[in-house]
Image: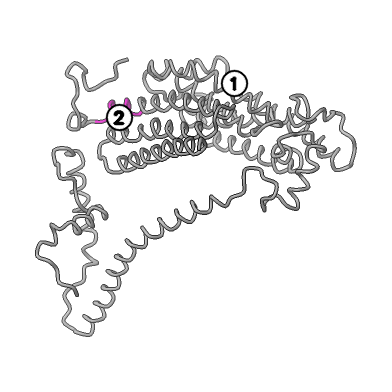
Amino acid sequence: MNEWVVFSFAAILIIGGLLVSLIAAFGLFKFRFALNRMHAAAMCDTLAILLVLLGLIVIDGASILSLKLGLIIVLLWCASPVSSHLLANMEVIVSSKLKDNCEVPEQEEGGASES
Amino acid sequence: MSRVRSDYEKSFRARFRRYISGEEELKDVDYMPLFEKQIADERAEDEKATEHYLVPPIKDPQEDARLYAEYSGIKWFRRLYQVMAVVLCVAICGVLIYNIAFMPGFGSADSPMNNGVSERYLEKGEEETGVTNIVTGLIISYRGFDTFGETHVLFIATIAVMILLKLRKDEKPVVAEGEEEGGDIILTTIARVLVPMIFLFGFYVLVNGHLSPGGGFSGGAVMGAGLILYSASFGFTKTAKFFNEKIYDIIKVGSLLLYSMLIGYNLFTGANGIASVVPLGRAGEILSAGLILPINILVGLEVACTMYAFYALFRKGAI
């Protein structure tokens, strides 16, 4: 009985992660503007991976493998938002028709980065 | 031929077909002015380019019938293609997912891969090479000559890239404005935390190669990625303080020469049945397995240098 509860909980988590990554892949191909696409792709990098790895942690229970998986989650949550941020920054600097696609605050001249 | 409904163009099926084949634009035009003109231009260009292929009206009934047969075949093929693409994709996915259930467990003894030769390796490997991770024992010891060649391939590849991309001494590397000081604040903050961890992990994978999964190539790749991250976030001037061309040359050539010497000694003693000077030690300890540990470290240094050299040469034309 207990095993089934753990298994179904893990299965729900993993299937949720797969669904999120499916939606992300769909959005990645259907959106036209780079920043919108990036928003879809970032979901796959963070939420989907978090759900799938949490499901694996639930299956494995408290062990050294779970600890390693947790460290993978921490690493990915550090790394992939930063890379998304850099890509978005590049897009904002390079894109010539940014104002046609999204709202740009007035004070930032040409949408340059804040730093 | 089936009857075509008068409102066929507006029906769900037609819209869906156009959507699948990518003909239908998004309805909200204001949303994508950036692409609209471009797409229209490409359309016009395409139509202009395919004008020659349009078939002129034909009077001859025989010719007409032949063309009809040909073109209706193509039409049917296109329909079939759309259906079959989906069906094949789903079928292959299904077969692969179904077969995962029958894969033998990780490392189980009775899986079909573990027979004959690999059984011999599994039985005698720990005793002969002193490693607990048989894969490293295979790569460095049993198939040492192959790995030796691979490392030379890395070395030669770097030299080839250098011949193509390295700048002459009187040329200045082209670096964008502000690139030397490093990237933005978010990147540097994260890199300050991550780079030491990446280096530590890479070194752990290197040194632990004969005890757990890992080894020279994977550990070296991790360390090379750490170097690339450091130079991307803090700039090349800061990287050059601890990793410039002189140090690179010493590490790259020195590790390859040392590796050649060690593997030569290993092959010589192994082929002639002479006992090696280096003791195998007790399996499972860090200082064991004879020459495999130093060879792993040397291979890792080679791989790390190769990765960083590729990055630096492609980015600014010098190391």
Query: Residue B61: percent from the left, percent from the top?
Result: 19, 84
In the foreground, B121 or B32: B121
**Percent x, y of residue B48:** 20, 58
Q: Residue A59: horizontal and vertical position, in percent?
A: 52, 35
Q: Which mark is residue A91?
A: 2
Expressed as whole percent of the image width and height from the top left, the position of residue A50 reads 43, 30
Regarding residue B308, the answer to whether it shows in the image is no
Q: Residue at x 84, y 28 (%)?
A: B278
At horizontal 55% and vertical 23% (from top left) the residue drawn is B198
Q: Looking at the image, which residue is at 55% across and 31% down?
A: B307
Above or below: residue A17 compared with residue B73: above
Q: Amino acid at mark 2?
A: Glu
Q: Is A97 on the left or on the right of B214, as rendered?
A: left
Q: Chain of mark 1?
A: B
Chain letter of disc 2 in the image: A
Q: Which residues are magenta?
A: A87-95
Between B283 and B245, the one lying in front of the other is B283
Image mark for residue B200: 1
Question: Does B111 sit left or right of B276 as displayed?
Answer: left
Q: Nearer the viewer, residue B29 or B10?
A: B10
